[in-house]
Structure formats: structure tokens, C-alpha cells
Image: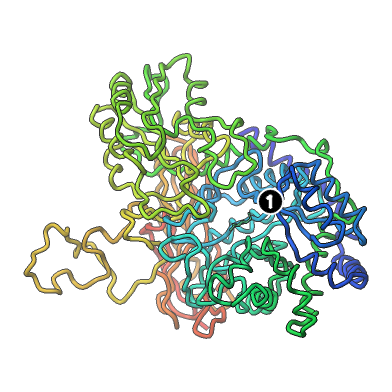
């Protein structure tokens, strides 16, 4: 806590420093001078040099200078990706600035997704903190470490809404809710970029993947997406608008086909929404070879046509298709594209280079930075991991463990001591040697007083029953408590790592059953890159702590929670289905004309074969599972109990343009100090287009001592109740609303109000 306070104090000092820098550097703070410098440079550039700016090339550090040096000298490369060695980057920048005709520096990009060397929880885990301030700090630390390596552009935040835990990239996403995603998007952009891009330790952000990628059919990566404009605008596009409002410098086009037009050639997305409606001034980069893929999608017949389609739609930079560099000049010569497109793209790319301060100094001095895994970065990583873990169940207060009463502890499972796996997907630069595993942290904390018996039991999460299961059972029998570290390795989520079955892999459920049979308390800590279907283990354990892939400091954070040093406070950013066949299942669904209800539920085993078709009441449910999820969006327990009561609004009726207050009393009714995430949901009862049964509108973390009571108050302007209506314009419609305040999306504490004209 003290470390975190220091971190926050330091960020305040850094912020003041940044403001001082802004004030003393009029060139950087004045966008008109950036524009003047861009215009002056553009006027001196040849067509080939402009097209060169639109070309992004990959190389590893070992071969970068030999493979890219000459092209950079000739002005044919505007950006490189995946070169991370600072000396190599400095050399590439030296070549660009000293040996190319116009001395234009490079954008040096990398996927810094949830940390660089110090790894923070996966983005889905960060969303589970419901703490944008902390998420912003995590991005700031990642940016600082990346900047110290010479990088100046990250391909993050990834802000694809998804309702599909099969999709491997849910790990990188903020989950299923547009409002939570908006807040995470803004936090990450601010964390990477700060208020002033040219300040030390800041790098440009890239909001990706625009747009709709998270709706990939059946959760198969890269698969088709079909999204109505209603769905797009009311759910999928919103985090992108928030990222842009927070200042995101760049956008990445999605790989996916959206309603028949792949995003990379989708004029509706790139021109109408991004440029005309949102007035986005940064630039758009394709995804890796996504321009070339336009012909594989079947949209174009060849690469030349693909280049034309992409640049016409509004793609400014070609990541690794080599198509802009090959075909744009010819397309202009043949009059097939307007040269103004090239000027506009090059100008936007150059503007970012000016704003980053690269024309003033493109060299990086690592000694100007605190170094990797500095104490403040580790403190943020630890706090983020701590706040991201979600206590799904805790029967009879099985947790926290009372260390004073423990003699022997069995630590079992493939993820108890897996330094690499706890880091999660997209950790190119993460250093597993920095990882503190749960086993290491438990040993360090309890080693002197508690006999810890560790049995890995499974070589990987996918292993089958083996004699090692017997060793695990023995260890459990001889211990006071069995702590199981289950889940999936990092390779089972992330790009192109989707799963059709999202149960715990391998024979983990069987391991749980065998340990359960010992009669000892069983605590499951699950490390995973996605929501899993836990129906086959949920009743076999006393408690489940869902820790995602928690990053470098995961073991310390998990140990703090297990031992009650802190109380769990993460909340689910995505619904946990009972079984995979329920997917997509999400809290902000529509009511339908025949909503399900509990009194009509039957078990498929009890169905009377000859009963009439209408015997179940004809509602929207599956015959073979309950219509609710196993754990709803927003769910998460703590070591205390919280109660909400007396929800009220300050007025029953408000006029369009007014602000309403919704408040409720929150009490810590237990005996432990803890954080609670209070959540405000609203339902628009009748709309010109049907509206979701609930929508998250606000949330806030509170810390309450035992017995402490507070008033949770949220303000809502009527604009906050707007949605994209029939003509696809944002509109707030008069009428009746319900509002709930509580600790989860299934809260029942409700009030109501009306909006009048
Ligand atoms: C991914 C992007 C990533 C890019 C560069 C692509 O395969 O879809 O998210 O930024 O590669 O590594």
C-alpha cells in the first residue's frame, strides 16, 4: 500500500514535470506549429518518400541494420516493428535521421500489451480491477520500460468487445461491456501517452482492432463477423470513440470481414465513422498483412487491387503486406487513386513523429530511465494482480487461510510454479525470471512455520490421470488444506488460440474430484486467459479464486489474498457460462418477447416425452441448462459482506438535458476491511429500438471498514442514457427507466425514474 502511495505520488510529480515541459516547449504544445512543420516537410518530399512513410517493415534486432538499413537510407520505410534492442534502434534512427535525404525519424513499434519486462495482469484481468487509475498506472509503467528500449509506439490498447470466451483474444480485451471498456480504453491511452507525447517515458498508443473483431463467429480467430449497425454502434464502436477522445494517436484495422467488407477495406468504418463522424486526426495502420489478405477474403483479385481498396478506404500505413510500396505509385500514375490520399496519409504519420519529439531527438538514452522492473513498476504489477483476482465462491469462509492454524499445506497443480505461464499471452519481452510464482511466494511467507508439500501432479494443464495424481492425494491427506493451482497455460489463449471446449483442460476436473475425496478443504486458484466453464468443479471445491494470468507479481498478490493480507476485490468483466453451448451469453442482452423465468425450468432428464409442445411455457431457454450464467458479469466476493439498501433518485422525473442523482446506502456488514465495487445499471424500458435488460452506467471502488456505512451516489446526465436509435444517431428518448445499484449485474435493489421532454 505504501509502495502504491509512492507510485501515485510519483505520478503526480511526473505529471507536474510533464506540464512544466509542455509549457516550456511551445513547439510541442502548439498543434499549429506541428502542422506547419509537416506542411513544410511534405512540400519537400517526393512521391516515393511519401509512400515510404506509409510502409512498415518487420525485422528482428539481429538483422535489422543489414536488412532495413539501405531501405531506410532511401526513405522507403516510415516505421519498423519488432526491433527491440536499444542500440539497434538507435542505429536505425541514426541512419534515418543522418543518412536519409530528409532525415525523417522512424516510428518504432511493438506489441506492448500488458507490460514490457514487468508484466501486468492480462488486459482482461486489468479490466477485472474495475480501477481505471490503476490500469493507467500499469500502462504508464509499460510505456516507460518500452521507451527506455527505444520504442515509441505500442499496438495497444486492444479494446475489442467480446461475448465469446472461446475466442483466444478475449485475454487481450476488456471483456463484454462497452462502458467498462470505454473506461479501460481511456485509462490505457492516458497511461501510454500521458498528456504530452514527447515527454520521457511516453509512447504512442494504437487502439485496435477497428472494428467488430470480437464478434468472430464461434469464437474462431479471424472468422467472419456479421454485426448490425445497431450492435456496432451501441456496443463495439464505443470503446474506440473513448480511446480517440482520450487522445489515441493511431488506430489499427481489424483482420476481420465485417458484414461482407473486410475492415481493411471498409469505407464505412474508416471514412464515415472514423473521419467524418469522429473527426479522428491520427492515422490508421493495417493489421499484419491484412491488405494482402483482402484477396484471400475474396474481395479483390490481386495485390494491386488490394492496395487500391485499402488506401481508398483510409488505411494510411501498410503493416507487412509490402503492397503500398509496390503498387501505390503505379496506381497514381494510372489515375486510379487520388494523390491527395498519399499526402494526407504521409502528413498524419509525420505529425505523430513531430508530436513524439522525434525530429528533435530520436536517440534513446536508457540510463535516463529507472531500469526494468523498478520497485514502483513491481508495486503496480502487484497491486494490479491483487485487484484483478475475483473470488468466485467461498463456502463457509474457507478463505482466507489462517496461517497461525496451519501445520501442513498441500500445494498442487500445474500452475503453482510456472513462471512463464502466469505471464499470459503477448509477452514478447516479458522476463519470466522476474516472476514470483504462487509456490515461491507461499514458501517465502510460510516456509518457516508451515510444512508445504508441493505436487505438480500434471505436467501440463492438458495432462491425463497419472500416478502423480496419487502423490497429490497423499499430500492432501497429510495436510490441513489443499491448495490447487489450476487453469490453462498462456499458449491456450491469445491470437489464433481459440478453444471450442472451455472446461479446465486435461484431467484437472478428475484431479479436483480425487482431492475432494480426501475430505480436506479444497481451494482452487485458477490462472487462465479467459472465462472457463467451471460447472464440473464448482461444487467440488470450497473456494475459487480466479486470478487470470496475473503477471510478474502474481504469486505475491495471490498469496496476499489467500492469507487475508488483503481481501479480494476483482469483479468479472465477462460472464462465466455454465456450459459452452450458452455462448454468447452476456448480461446486457435483450429481453425478447418471451423471457425465461425460474418457474418454467425443467431438467431434460425429467421431460415427459408425450407432453404438449407448450408444456415449458415457450420461453427463451435451453432445455438442458439454466438460462442464467454460472457467474454473472460484475460478480466477485470479498472476505467481508456488503449490503446495499435504500436506493433512491433525487427526482422521479427529469427533463432532457438534466442530471439525475441515483444513490443507495452501502454497508460493510462483515468483520473485515475490504474494497467493494459499487455498480449502477439502468434499463430503458421502451425504446424506438429495443433496449438491453441492463446496462452498466457507472461504477466506483469503495474501501470500507467493518461496520462502516457510506452513501454511493452516481450522477447521470440524460446524454448518458442515449443510444443509437433507428436513424443511427445518438438519442435519449423520454420514457420510463429502471436503475439498480449493487455489487453485481444481477443485483435486485431497484428504483425508477422518467425522462420527460
Ligand atoms: C495482431 C495485432 C498485432 C500485430 C503486430 C497481428 O497478428 O492481430 O494485434 O498488433 O500482429 O504484431
Residue 72 occupies which quadrant of the picture? bottom right
Q: Dividing the image into 4 quarters, which one contains the N terminus?
A: top right
- Image coords of residue 130 (percent x, y): 53, 51
Q: Residue 385 sits in which quadrant?
A: top right
Q: Position of residue 490 (x, y in %)?
A: 50, 43
**In the image, 40: left or right of 402?**
right
Q: In this rendering, would 95 be left or right of 274?
A: right
* Relative vertical location of residue 756 with respect to residue 326 in this rendering, above or below: below
Residue at 51% x, 72% y: name it: 234
Specify whether tag 1 is near ligand 1 (CB below 8 Å). Answer: yes
Q: Is residue 338 above or below residue 437?
A: below
Residue drawn 76% across and 55% down? 195
Residue 674: x percent and y percent?
Answer: 48, 39
Residue 97 versus residue 688: which sits nearer the camera? Answer: 97
Q: Is residue 281 visible?
A: yes
Left/right placement of residue 273 relative to residue 283 reads left
Amino acid at each position: 500500500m505504501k509502495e502504491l502511495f509512492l507510485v501515485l505520488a510519483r505520478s503526480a510529480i511526473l505529471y507536474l514535470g510533464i506540464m512544466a515541459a509542455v509549457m516550456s516547449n511551445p513547439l510541442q504544445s502548439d498543434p499549429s506549429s506541428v502542422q506547419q512543420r509537416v506542411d513544410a516537410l511534405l512540400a519537400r518530399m517526393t512521391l516515393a518518400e511519401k509512400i515510404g512513410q506509409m510502409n512498415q517493415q518487420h525485422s528482428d534486432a539481429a538483422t535489422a541494420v543489414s536488412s532495413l538499413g539501405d531501405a531506410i537510407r532511401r526513405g522507403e520505410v516510415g516505421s519498423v516493428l519488432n526491433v527491440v534492442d536499444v542500440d539497434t534502434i538507435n542505429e536505425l534512427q541514426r541512419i534515418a535521421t543522418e543518412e536519409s535525404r530528409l532525415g525523417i525519424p522512424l516510428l518504432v513499434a511493438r506489441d506492448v500489451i500488458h507490460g514490457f519486462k514487468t508484466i501486468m495482469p492480462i488486459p482482461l484481468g486489468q479490466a477485472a480491477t474495475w480501477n481505471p487509475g490503476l490500469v493507467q498506472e500499469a500502462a504508464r509503467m509499460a510505456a516507460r520500460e518500452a521507451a527506455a528500449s527505444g520504442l515509441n509506439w505500442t499496438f495497444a490498447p486492444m479494446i475489442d468487445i467480446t461475448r465469446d470466451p472461446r475466442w483466444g483474444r478475449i485475454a487481450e480485451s476488456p471483456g463484454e461491456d462497452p462502458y467498462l471498456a470505454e473506461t479501460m480504453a481511456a485509462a490505457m491511452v492516458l497511461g501510454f501517452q500521458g498528456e504530452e507525447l514527447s515527454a520521457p517515458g511516453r509512447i504512442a498508443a494504437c487502439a485496435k482492432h477497428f472494428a467488430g473483431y470480437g464478434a468472430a463467429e464461434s469464437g474462431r480467430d479471424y472468422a467472419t463477423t456479421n454485426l448490425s449497425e445497431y450492435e456496432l454502434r451501441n456496443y463495439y464502436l464505443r470503446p474506440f470513440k473513448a480511446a480517440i477522445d482520450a487522445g489515441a494517436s493511431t488506430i489499427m484495422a481489424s483482420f476481420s470481414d465485417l458484414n461482407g467488407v473486410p475492415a481493411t477495406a471498409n469505407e464505412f468504418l474508416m471514412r464515415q465513422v472514423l473521419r467524418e463522424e469522429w473527426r479522428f486526426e491520427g492515422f490508421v495502420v493495417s493489421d499484419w498483412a491484412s491488405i494482402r489478405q483482402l484477396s484471400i477474403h475474396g474481395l479483390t483479385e490481386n495485390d494491386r487491387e488490394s492496395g487500391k481498396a485499402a488506401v481508398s478506404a483510409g488505411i494510411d500505413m501498410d503493416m507487412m503486406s509490402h503492397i503500398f510500396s509496390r503498387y501505390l505509385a503505379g496506381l497514381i500514375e494510372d489515375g486510379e487513386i487520388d494523390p491527395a490520399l498519399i499526402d494526407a496519409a504521409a502528413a498524419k504519420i509525420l505529425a505523430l513523429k513531430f508530436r513524439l519529439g522525434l525530429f528533435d531527438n530520436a536517440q534513446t538514452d536508457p540510463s535516463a530511465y529507472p531500469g526494468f522492473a523498478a520497485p514502483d513498476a513491481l508495486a503496480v504489477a502487484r497491486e494490479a494482480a491483487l485487484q484483478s483476482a475475483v473470488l468466485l465462491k467461498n463456502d463457509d469462509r474457507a478463505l482466507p487461510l489462517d496461517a497461525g492454524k496451519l501445520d501442513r499445506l498441500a500445494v498442487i497443480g500445474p500452475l503453482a510454479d510456472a513462471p512463464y505461464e502466469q505471464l499470459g499471452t503477448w509477452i514478447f519481452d516479458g522476463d519470466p525470471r522476474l516472476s514470483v510464482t504462487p509456490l515461491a511466494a507461499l514458501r517465502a511467507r510460510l516456509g518457516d512455520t508451515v510444512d508445504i508439500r508441493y505436487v505438480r501432479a500434471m505436467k501440463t494443464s492438458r495432462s491425463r490421470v497419472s500416478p502423480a495424481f496419487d502423490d497429490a492425494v497423499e499430500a492432501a491427506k497429510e495436510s490441513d488444506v489443499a491448495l490447487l493451482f489450476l487453469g490453462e497455460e498462456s499458449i491456450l489463449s491469445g491470437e489464433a488460440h481459440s478453444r471450442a471446449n472451455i472446461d479446465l483442460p486435461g484431467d484437472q476436473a478428475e484431479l479436483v474430484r480425487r482431492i475432494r475425496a480426501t475430505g480436506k478443504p479444497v481451494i482452487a486458484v485458477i490462472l487462465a486467459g479467459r472465462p472457463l466453464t467451471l460447472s464440473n468443479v464448482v461444487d467440488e471445491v470450497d473456494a475459487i479464486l480466479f486470478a487470470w494470468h496475473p503477471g510478474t507479481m502474481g504469486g505475491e498478490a495471490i498469496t496476499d489474498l489467500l492469507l487475508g493480507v488483503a481481501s479480494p476485490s476483482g469483479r468479472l468483466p465477462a460472464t462465466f457460462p455454465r456450459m459452452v453451448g450458452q455462448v454468447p451469453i452476456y448480461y446486457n442482452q435483450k429481453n425478447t418477447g418471451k423471457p425465461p423465468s425460474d418457474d418454467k425450468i425443467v431438467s431434460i432428464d425429467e421431460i415427459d416425452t408425450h407432453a404438449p409442445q407448450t408444456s415449458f411455457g415457450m420461453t427463451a431457454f435451453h432445455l438442458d441448462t439454466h438460462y442464467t450464467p454460472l457467474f454473472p458479469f460484475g460478480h466477485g466476493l470479498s472476505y467481508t459482506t456488503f449490503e446495499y439498501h435504500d436506493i433512491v433518485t433525487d427526482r422521479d422525473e427529469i427533463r432532457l438535458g438534466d442530471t439525475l442523482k441515483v444513490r443507495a446506502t452501502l454497508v460493510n456488514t462483515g468483520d473485515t476491511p475490504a474494497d467493494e465495487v459499487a455498480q449502477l445499471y439502468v434499463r430503458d424500458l421502451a425504446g424506438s429500438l429495443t433496449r438491453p435488460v441492463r446496462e452498466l452506467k457507472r461504477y466506483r471502488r469503495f474501501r470500507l471498514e467493518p461496520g462502516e456505512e457510506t452513501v454511493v451516489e452516481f450522477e447521470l446526465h440524460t446524454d448518458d442514457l442515449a443510444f443509437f436509435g433507428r436513424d443511427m444517431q445518438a438519442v435519449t428518448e423520454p420514457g420510463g427507466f429502471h436503475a439498480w445499484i449493487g455489487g453485481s449485474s444481477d443485483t435486485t435493489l431497484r428504483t425508477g425514474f422518467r425522462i420527460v421532454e
